Image (cartoon, rainbow, N blue to C red):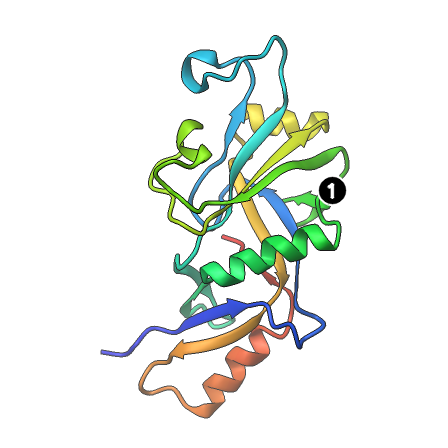
């Protein structure tokens, strides 16, 4: 049986183009984990507030989770990020002031949306994500909380149209496995594929 194509994506400090550019609000997050949104839902989240806070929290990146993609010929391949890469992505995101950069479905830019909290899960058993209702979150996951003052986006969150996050940026790649019949030409095609901005889209 042929091996699947498995590619590790990482941030190479020697490549000046490598960066995590944005976290997008999407209807179908590639990591298949929706975020929680908080208003007056005290019975479910114990979030005590007299008014809507307009805050959403969820995972932006999950380590070692294989995410299926399709190439130009509609053939599947898989990508993943290590814990180390996710830590670096979080650092780059903050260092270059990306906390106010976001969009909707990787297309429409938005204002009045700001990251107010960001953390890496170091102890899954005692992590804040458990208290918020998330289950089976692995060590090394990156969580973010956004304050949404954008009325259009908040309406999409409350209606359920927007369910989670998806990252976009430029990453280097390390091909872990190739089908046994693949040639150097296939290898070249994969490298060309990832020479453009990589977006985790479904």
Residue 98 visible, this orientation: yes
Identify the residue under disc 1: 100
User: x, y percentage for residue 52?
Assistant: 62, 15
Instruction: Kindly tell me whether residue 21 is visible in this rendering.
Output: no
Q: Nearer the viewer, residue 200 or 135?
A: 135
Q: Where is residue 30 in the image (x, y as percent from the top left)?
A: 47, 50
Q: Nearer the viewer, residue 118 or 36?
A: 118
| Tag count | 1
Answer few, some or many: residues within 10 Å of disc 1's Cα (few below 14, many 20 plus, some between 14 and 19).
some
- SS category of the residue bearing label 1: loop
Residue lying furthest bottom in this view?
184
Q: Compared with residue 153, is residue 177 higher up or lower down, i.e. above or below?
A: below
- Could you tell me residue 101's position as x and y percent? 73, 46
Q: Which residue is drawn at 45% across and 78% down?
A: 175
The one of 51 and 128 positioned closer to us in this rendering: 128
- Write the residue at 68% across / 49% down: 107
| In the image, farthest residue toward the top | 50
Looking at the image, residue 46 lies above or below residue 13: above
Q: Is residue 90 left or right of residue 149?
A: left
| Relative height, residue 171 to residue 33 (above, below) | below
Left or right for 140, reference 156: left
Q: In this view, does 113 lie to the left or right of 137?
A: right
**Percent x, y of residue 134:** 40, 34
Q: Quadrant of the N terminus?
A: bottom left
Residue furthest toward the left? 1
* Point 48% across, 76% down: residue: 174
Q: Say above or below: 201 vs 191.
A: above
């Amino acid at each position: 049986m042929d091996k699947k194509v498995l590619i590790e994506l990482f941030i190479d400090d020697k490549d000046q183009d490598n960066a995590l550019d944005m976290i997008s609000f999407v209807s179908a997050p590639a990591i298949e984990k929706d975020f929680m949104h908080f208003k007056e839902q005290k019975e479910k989240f114990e979030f005590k507030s007299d008014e809507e806070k307009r805050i959403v929290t969820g995972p932006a990146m999950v380590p070692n989770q294989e995410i299926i993609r399709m190439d130009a010929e509609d053939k599947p391949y898989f990508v993943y990020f290590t814990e180390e890469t996710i830590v670096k992505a979080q650092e780059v995101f903050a260092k270059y002031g990306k906390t106010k950069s976001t969009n909707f479905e990787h297309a429409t830019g938005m204002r009045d949306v700001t990251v107010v909290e960001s953390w890496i899960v170091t102890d899954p058993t005692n992590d804040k994500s458990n208290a918020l209702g998330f289950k089976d979150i692995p060590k090394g996951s990156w969580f973010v909380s956004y304050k949404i003052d954008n009325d259009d986006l908040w309406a999409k969150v409350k209606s359920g149209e927007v369910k989670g996050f998806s990252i976009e940026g430029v990453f280097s790649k390390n091909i872990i496995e190739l089908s046994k019949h693949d040639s150097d030409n296939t290898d070249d095609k994969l490298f060309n594929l990832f020479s453009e901005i990589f977006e985790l889209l479904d």
